[in-house]
């Protein structure tokens, strides 16, 4: 089923919805601009109302942009209806036909295209093999688990061999274990086919585990685009840092910005070093020091930069999450390999220090 992959280009796209009550128009997407490379899976990530689903619907053709252009490969599809775009969409609801068995559900799109019966049978069998449902071809959708139904929905989209696969929060109806399993399966299938895919979710774990790149959105505006590791370790703003992972923020004053080296700042009179700084941070500024739980270390009272008291230790097997009450709020410190380290008892006084290679200076605002 592998085919030549194409790119998807969203070029300066804005979507306005008319307000029928005489108020200003609602701008759902504002000047969005990004390119999905051939064979790449890009995730649109953000909170509800950020414009990610509207963007996906414009790529699919269910909504038309107010301005801007959308291209699939070299073809401008901005004003084309969905059936002329050669895309397939997997929705949050499975939308399976209850009166058809699995094989007939998968075959539906091919029958609409009036392919020969033998070719339909071959394509359906190959697609069911791909998603691991060959043995359930004759089963009714009502007798399938949620994960199996989602595989059928995915197979129905893949069997027509679209140029672009669009996925709109397809795992939100599944429980935690099934979501994890389906994330792995979607990634495996997408890579084995080499198909270009755009995925929408508000779940950061899905975005980070599935994607080649992540587009983080807020209020209709793209805030940052990058590989999951870049988005996590080197966010450009407090919003992106907080949305893609657990994080603590500390108010600091910047003393110096190292060019490719260590930047120095002060936190309540104590000097703290960071080897990473976002653009827009300058010497003399008030800024924010971003610290992930794994970038923090515990020491005795007065030995680190921030004093506090342990409120809880949460055992997670390979790590312990230690919660420390400080003047900056409750701070989460991740302790890896707890069996090899002495844990601080709940109620004991501690101090927190920073791993300069893992913390990052951010502008003071959002």
Image (cartoon, grey):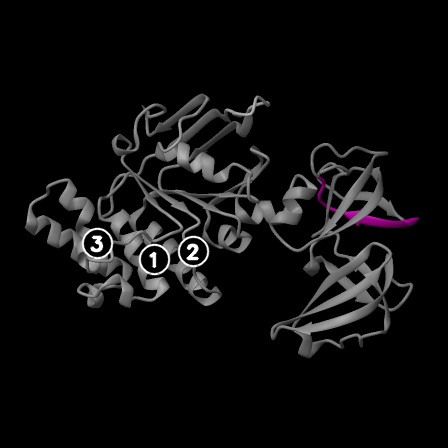
Residue corresponding to mark 1: 150
In this rendered view, identify the residue nearer to me: 64 or 253.
64
In this rendered view, identify the residue nearer to me: 186 or 111.
111
Real-space Cα distance between discs 1 and 3? 12 Å
Q: Position of residue 75 (x, y in %)?
A: 31, 25
Real-space Cα distance between discs 2 and 1? 8 Å
* First-in-chain label (2 vs 1): 1
Q: Residue furthest bottom?
A: 339
**Badge 2: few (under 14), some or many (20 or more) residues near its Cα, within 10 Å?**
many
Q: Position of residue 280 (x, y in %)?
A: 73, 32
Residue numbers of the magenta segment: 268-277
Q: Position of residue 333 (x, y in %)?
A: 73, 63
Q: Is residue 169 magenta?
A: no
* First-in-chain label (1 vs 3): 3
- Mark 1 and mark 3 residues within 8 Å of each other at the beta carbon: no
Task: Label 2, secondary structure: give it.
Answer: loop
Q: Position of residue 290 (x, y in %)?
A: 73, 48
* First-in-chain label (2 vs 3): 3
Q: Residue at x 27, y 41 (%)?
A: 162
Residue corresponding to mark 2: 171
Real-space Cα distance between discs 2 and 3? 19 Å
Is residue 217 found left or right of 7 in the rendered image?
right
Task: Label 3, secondary structure: give it.
Answer: helix
Q: Is residue 273 magenta?
A: yes
Quarter of the figure that contains the C terminus: top right
- Mark 2 and mark 1 residues within 8 Å of each other at the beta carbon: yes
Task: Label 1, secondary structure: give it.
Answer: helix
- Mark 2 and mark 3 residues within 8 Å of each other at the beta carbon: no
Q: Residue at x 55, y 52 (%)?
A: 204
Q: Residue at x 72, y 50 (%)?
A: 359
Residue corresponding to mark 3: 105
Q: Is residue 76 above or below residue 221?
A: above
């Amino acid at each position: 089923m592998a085919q030549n992959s194409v790119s998807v280009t969203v070029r300066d796209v804005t979507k306005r919805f008319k307000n029928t009550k005489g108020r200003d128009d609602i701008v759902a997407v504002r000047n969005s601009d990004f390119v999905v490379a051939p064979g790449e899976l890009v995730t649109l990530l953000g909170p509800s109302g950020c414009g990610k689903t509207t963007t996906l619907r414009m790529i699919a053709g269910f909504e038309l942009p107010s301005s801007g252009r959308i291209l699939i490969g070299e073809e401008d599809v901005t004003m084309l209806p969905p059936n002329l775009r050669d895309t397939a969409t997997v929705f949050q609801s499975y939308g399976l036909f209850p009166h058809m068995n699995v094989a007939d559900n998968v075959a539906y799109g091919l029958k609409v295209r009036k392919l020969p019966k033998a070719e339909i049978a071959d394509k359906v069998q190959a697609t069911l093999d791909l998603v691991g449902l060959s043995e359930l071809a004759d089963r009714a959708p009502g007798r399938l688990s949620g994960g199996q139904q989602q595989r059928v929905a995915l197979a129905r989209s893949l069997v027509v061999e679209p140029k672009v696969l669009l996925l709109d929060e397809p795992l939100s109806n599944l429980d935690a274990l099934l979501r994890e399993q389906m994330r792995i399966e979607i990634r495996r299938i997408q890579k084995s086919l080499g198909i270009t895919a755009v995925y929408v979710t508000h779940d950061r774990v899905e975005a980070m585990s599935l994607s080649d790149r992540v587009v983080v959105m807020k209020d209709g505006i793209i805030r940052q685009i990058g590989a999951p590791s870049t988005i996590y370790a080197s966010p450009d703003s407090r919003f992106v840092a907080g949305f893609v992972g657990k994080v603590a923020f500390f108010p600091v004053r910047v003393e110096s910005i190292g060019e490719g080296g260590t930047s120095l700042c002060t936190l309540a009179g104590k000097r703290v070093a960071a080897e990473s700084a976002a653009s827009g941070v300058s010497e003399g500024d008030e800024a924010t020091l971003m610290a992930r739980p794994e970038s923090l270390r515990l020491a005795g009272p007065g030995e680190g930069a921030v004093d506090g008291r342990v409120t809880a230790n949460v055992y997670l097997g390979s790590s312990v999450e230690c919660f420390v009450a400080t003047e900056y709020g409750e701070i989460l410190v991740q302790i890896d390999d707890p069996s090899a380290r002495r844990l601080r008892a709940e109620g004991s006084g501690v101090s927190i220090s920073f791993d300069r290679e893992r913390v990052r200076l951010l502008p003071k605002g959002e």
